[in-house]
């Protein structure tokens, strides 16, 4: 893998790590039993940023290694699917469990971009928040393994 691609991926990883660092105190102080509209709006923004960062990494790999540039109304799902299934140029980067977790964040991303924040439902957000750190750790570990083995 070219150094410039590695540099882009490492930068995106550092940006997602920074997202977690910047909002750590927010998550520590939030009322998880009954979050306010502002709390849910902040959470929505964090989840959206998180998935966009993941997708930036996957898009970099898809374009620069696979020469795969999806287009159309299913672009985001195609990028995630491409990373999961692999191809003749490389093996799959993420496993099935991580793929399924990321599909939930992709679904949220779509909802968030096409809705108003006052429609955010805490019962639907709660599992995304609960799994956020674990999902990132799994994805990051698998991305780094891919980078180290190529």
Image: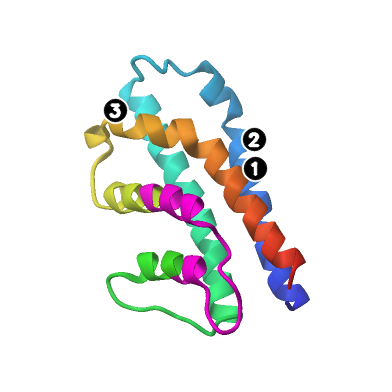
Q: How is the image coloured?
A: rainbow
Write the residue at 39% across / 32% down: 127
Would you call the spot at circle 1 few (<14 residues within 10 Å), some (14-19), or many (20 or more)?
A: few
Would you call the spot at circle 2 few (<14 residues within 10 Å), some (14-19), or many (20 or more)?
A: few
Label annotation for residue 115: none
Residue 83, position as x, y percentages in the image: 51, 68
With 68 as the anchor, is 123 left or right in this view?
left
Q: Which residue is nearer to you in this view: 22 or 77? A: 77
Q: Do callouts 1 and 2 mark residues in contact (Cβ within 8 Å)?
A: yes
Which badge, 3 or 2, comes first in the chain's sequence? 2
Q: Bounds of the magenta span?
A: 82-104
Q: Do callouts 3 and 2 mark residues in contact (Cβ within 8 Å)?
A: no
Label annotation for residue 18: 1
Give the CA distance from mark 1 to mark 2.
Answer: 5 Å
Write the residue at 59% across / 41% down: 19
Quadrant in which residue 70 is drawn: bottom left
Quarter of the image containing the C terminus? bottom right
Where disc 3 sits, the SS reads helix
Label annotation for residue 123: 3
């Amino acid at each position: 893998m070219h150094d410039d691609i590695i540099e882009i991926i490492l930068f995106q990883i550092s940006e997602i790590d920074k997202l977690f660092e910047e909002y750590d105190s927010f998550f520590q102080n939030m009322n998880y039993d009954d979050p306010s509209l502002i709390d849910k709006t902040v959470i929505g923004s964090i989840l959206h940023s998180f998935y966009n960062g993941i997708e930036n990494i996957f898009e970099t790999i898809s374009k620069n290694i696979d020469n795969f540039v999806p287009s159309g109304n299913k672009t985001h799902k195609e990028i995630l699917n491409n990373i999961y299934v692999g191809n003749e140029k490389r093996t799959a980067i993420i496993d099935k469990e991580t793929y399924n977790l990321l599909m939930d964040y992709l679904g949220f991303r779509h909802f968030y971009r096409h809705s108003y924040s006052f429609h955010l439902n805490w019962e639907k957000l709660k599992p995304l928040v609960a799994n956020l750190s674990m999902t990132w750790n799994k994805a990051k570990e698998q991305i780094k393994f891919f980078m180290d083995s190529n």
